[in-house]
Image (cartoon, rainbow, N blue to C red):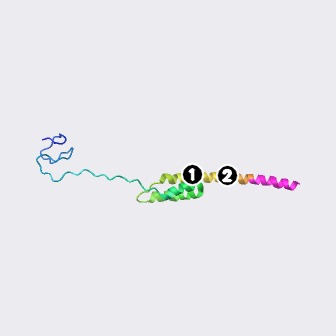
Amino acid sequence: MFCQGCGTELAQIATFCSQCGRPKPGTTATHQPSMPQYQPMQAPVTSGLAIGALVAALFIPLLGLILGYVARNDIRSSNPPKGGDGLATAAIVIGWIFTILGGLLLVFILAFWGEIMAGFWDGYYNY
């Protein structure tokens, strides 16, 4: 005997078609095999702390650096997992880069300020 839906040959003891799931003609099938039900995966919630760390790293690098480490630790220890690990890592990288550049800029400004002031005072006292 063949399935009326898809044409697959049915075994004698079969009550349903193994291909399409239709009941075998002439049987009083009350239970149709269930198809697996899949739940759609939801995207993890992005950590607000990671977003804040990235924004802070652009304007106040040292604060962004600290918040980036705190956010990354929070994301990795959360259950269910949160999203935003990349944002936290970016905040850490940007925070380090801007903190180092800011420190170097401060050193150069202080060094040149000292040179400017030394020349000013030397010229002032020469008169």
Mark 2 is surrounded, within 10 Å at the Cα level, by few (under 14), some (14 to 19) or many (20 or more) other residues, namely: few
Q: Secondary structure at mark 1?
A: helix
Residue closest to the eye, 38 or 92: 38
Assign the N terminus to one quadrant of the image. top left
**Position of residue 17 measured from the top left corner of the image (x, y, whole percent):** 18, 45
Q: How many angstroms separate mark 1 from mark 2 (CA)?
A: 16 Å
Mark 1 is surrounded, within 10 Å at the Cα level, by few (under 14), some (14 to 19) or many (20 or more) other residues, namely: many
**Mark sitting earlier along the chain (1/2):** 1
Look at label 1 and name its amino acid.
Answer: Ile
Q: Residue at x 52, y 57 (%)?
A: 52
Q: Is residue 107 left or right of residue 41?
A: right
Q: Which mark is residue 105?
A: 2
Q: Secondary structure at mark 2?
A: helix
**Position of residue 78 measured from the top left corner of the image (x, y, whole percent):** 44, 59
Residue closest to the eye, 127 or 72: 127
- Examine the image and state in which quarter residue 77 appears: bottom left
The boundaries of the magenta stretch are 113-127
Q: Residue at x 59, y 51 (%)?
A: 97
- Label count reads 2
Name the main secondary structure of what is drawn in magenta. helix
Assign the C terminus to one quadrant of the image. bottom right
What residue is shown with label 1?
94
Q: Is residue 50 left or right of residue 117?
A: left
Look at label 2 and name its amino acid.
Answer: Leu
Q: Residue at x 58, y 58 (%)?
A: 63
